Image (cartoon, rainbow, N blue to C red):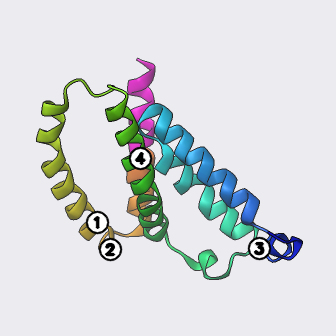
Amino acid sequence: MSRNFFHSLPPYFLPLVAIGISAGFINGLLGAGGGIVLVLLLPRLAKRRSIGDCREMENRDWYASALSVMLPATVISGAIYLLRGGMPELDFAWWLVLPAAVGGAVGALLLGRIKGSWLRRLFAALVIFSGIRMIF
């Protein structure tokens, strides 16, 4: 790679890579939470660095973006857990796959119909509830 390659990178390249690594690390370590990192940090980065059309994105766009980014990270993490013997109850997990896929499809369809302010509140309530449950 030449020096020109690095000079052609956008100024937000390194923060974006750092956010991606952080989200993947947290998802791989804890099995969840990477999407939360993305939803919290990506809009701030886009507004701070004036990243084109991203400044105009709504909450639902950020949630959808986080989902699309976390899918490969989740698949890779799951494969590593499986290969290392980290899923001893695999038969039990298969009973969750189809219902989770149906729930994901319904959630994705609803995402376009719910006001952004309600999505933000729902997301905040979920994060707070999850945090309280984890503490106790």
The residue indicated by pointer 3 is 10
CB-based contact (under 8 Å), mark 1 and mark 2:
yes
Q: Amino acid at mark 1?
A: Ala
Secondary structure category for the residue under label 3:
loop
Residue at image x 47%, y 66%? 65
Q: How many angstroms separate mark 3 from mark 4 (CA)?
A: 28 Å
Sooner in the amino-acid sequence: mark 3 or mark 1: 3
Residue marked by disc 1: 108
Residue at disc 4, secondary structure: helix
Q: Report whether 123 appears left or right of 48.
A: left
The tag earlier along the polypeptide, 2 or 4, is 4
Q: CA distance from mark 1 to mark 4?
A: 22 Å
Q: Quarter of the image containing the C terminus? A: top left
Marker disc for residue 112: 2
State the separation of the CA atoms marked 3 and 2. 30 Å
Name the amino acid, label 2.
Answer: Gly
**Dot 4 alpha-carbon crowd within 10 angstroms: few under 14, some 14 to 19, many 20 or more:** some
